Amino acid sequence: MTRVLVIEDERDLQQVLAYNLRKEGFDVLQALDGLEGLRTAKVHKPDMILLDLMLPDLPGTEVCKALKADATTREIPVLMLTAKGEEIDRVLGFELGAEDYVVKPFSVRELLLRIHAILRRVQGAKTSNPEDTVTFGRLRIDTAAYRAWVDATEIQLTSIEFRLLVMLYERRNRVQTRASLLEDVWGLQADTETRTVDTHVKRLREKLGAAEIYIETVRGVGYRFAASPEEVEA
């Protein structure tokens, strides 16, 4: 049975989430603060974590950071629960490795759909097939497994970095503005600080190493993925 840990300090919401998750067939673990959540995650190794950003002892971003820094919990997907207007925290959460977020107040049905989507993605990483793999010069991407390689070496990408890479690749030879990337990759409005996009592209390029040449900066506009490897490797 799939196990979900809910780290949420609002007791009423905690009970609503637990009830609906159990009704959906999940085994549910519960924690009312960050430290309890970290202990529970380390001991019971849930398949997924729902994490509130506003906790009484630790910010949810710090809890996420601790989870991703620990080898025993870093692979557990995290879905953040956040209030409206906290886009800075959401961006930071993505940078720390969170898979997704849902804004309060939210539809329980929407939450369940997002949970299932994340779990399918994680399962796909274990059962991917050759049809899910694309090759572009020195770069190879397994879209189902959320994995990428440069030459024969796998590169370790966060979920956001991977989505950014796939988005640029799928729209290759077309300039993507910072605003469009912010909306399509992060789900954030264009008036949010655009340095977020630049910072992630910089980190992505550093991880791509020799394949960084496939991502071109279009000054004053955004970024473009090369139309073909030969275009930049010649």
Image (tube, rainbow, N blue to C red):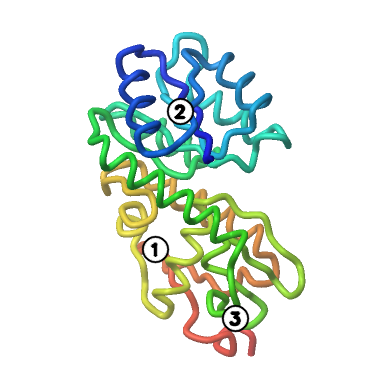
Secondary element at tag 3: strand
Query: Residue placed at 36% from the left, 46% from the top?
Result: 114
Compared to residue 82, the image places residue 188 above or below, namely below
Residue positioned most to the top: 56
Mark closer to the observer (1, 3): 3
Residue positioned most to the right: 152
Task: Give the residue at mark 3.
Answer: 135
Q: How far, Cα to Cα, is label 2 from label 3? A: 36 Å
Disc 2 packing (10 Å; few <14; some 14–19; many ≥20): many
Q: Amino acid at mark 1?
A: Gly
Q: Amino acid at mark 2?
A: Leu
Mark closer to the observer (2, 1): 2
Query: Residue placed at 41% from the left, 52% from the top?
Result: 117
Q: Amino acid at mark 3?
A: Thr
Secondary element at tag 2: strand
- Is residue 220 left or right of 108 when viewed as pictured? right
Mark closer to the observer (2, 3): 2
Disc 1 packing (10 Å; few <14; some 14–19; many ≥20): some
Task: Give the residue at mark 1.
Answer: 222
Give x and y (percent) for residue 159: 52, 51
Q: Between disc 2 and disc 3, whose residue precedes?
A: 2
